[in-house]
Image (spheres, rainbow, N blue to C red):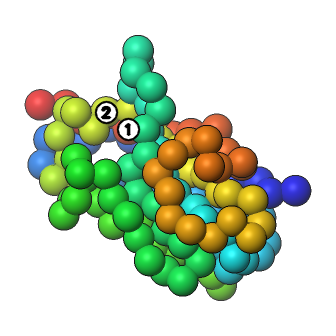
């Protein structure tokens, strides 16, 4: 079974940075599947932030291009999200997600992901 556990959230002032980590079950990050980071603010729908495929190709939501970077360390079974130049609009619960084995293509659609972590809160103050 795929398990995902996020960490690294917290409170930061506008302009600051945070790095989120997602510890995955053994073999998940190196397997042929899509992975991604999503976020959900109160009263809003869950939205895709950054996705990565098994070849390391990435896709970003327009709102985070140039500020957020996704990466993974297969030796550590960990997915990362480096977030720079944070602004109050980035405040949300952030979730790590993985697709089913063999579903390799990039996607920022929540429906394309099967496995989810419980989330880590990011709060950006002005």
Residue plotted at (68% across, 65% down): 103
- Residue at left 49%, top 80%? 56
Specify the label residue 23 is tagged with.
none
Measuring from the top left, give residue 81's x and y in whole percent.
Answer: 41, 61
Residue 23 image offset from top left, x and y in percent? 65, 61
Q: Quadrant of the C terminus?
A: top left
Provide the secondary structure element on which disc 2 rests.
loop
Judge by depth and name the residue closer to the eye, 92 or 35.
Answer: 35
Specify whether 2 is left or right of 50.
right
Foreground pick, 35 / 88:
35
**Please, which residue is most extreme toward the top here?**
43
The residue positioned 19% from the left and 63% from the top of the image is 66
Q: Which residue is mark 1?
A: 122
Position of 117 relative to 99 (above/below): above
Count residues near mark 2 (Cα–Cα under 10 Å), then give few for <14, some for 14-19, many for 20+: many
- What is the quadrant of the N terminus in the image? bottom right
Q: Quadrant of residue 9?
A: top left
Depth order, front residue of 7/48: 48
Residue that mark 2 sits on: 91
As measured in the structure, the alpha-carbon distance from the residue carrying label 2 to the one carrying label 1 is 5 Å
Q: Earlier in the sequence, mark 2 or mark 1?
A: 2
Q: Is residue 45 left or right of residue 14?
A: right
Kindly identify the residue that appears in the image at 20 percent across and 33 percent down. Answer: 88
Find out whether the residues at labels 2 and 1 contact each other: C-beta distance under 8 Å: yes
Residue 45 appears in view: yes
Give left or right: position of 27 versus 70: right
Q: Position of residue 41 (x, y in %)?
A: 39, 26
Q: Is 111 rendered above or below residue 98?
A: above
Structural crowding at the residue carrying mark 1, measured as other residues with C-alpha within 10 Å and reported as few (<14), some (14–19) or many (≥20): many
Residue 76 shows in the view? no
Q: Secondary structure at mark 1?
A: strand
């Amino acid at each position: 079974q795929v398990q995902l556990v996020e960490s690294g959230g917290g409170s930061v002032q506008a302009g600051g940075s945070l790095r989120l980590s997602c510890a995955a079950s053994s073999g998940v990050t190196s397997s042929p599947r899509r992975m991604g980071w999503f976020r959900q603010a109160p009263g809003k729908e869950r939205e895709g932030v950054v996705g990565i495929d098994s070849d390391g190709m990435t896709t970003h939501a327009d709102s985070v291009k140039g500020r957020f970077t996704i990466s993974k360390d297969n030796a550590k079974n960990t997915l990362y999200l480096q977030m720079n130049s944070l602004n109050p609009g980035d405040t949300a619960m952030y979730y790590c997600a993985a697709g089913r084995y063999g579903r390799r293509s990039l996607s920022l659609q929540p429906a394309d992901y099967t496995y989810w972590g419980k989330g880590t809160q990011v709060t950006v103050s002005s």
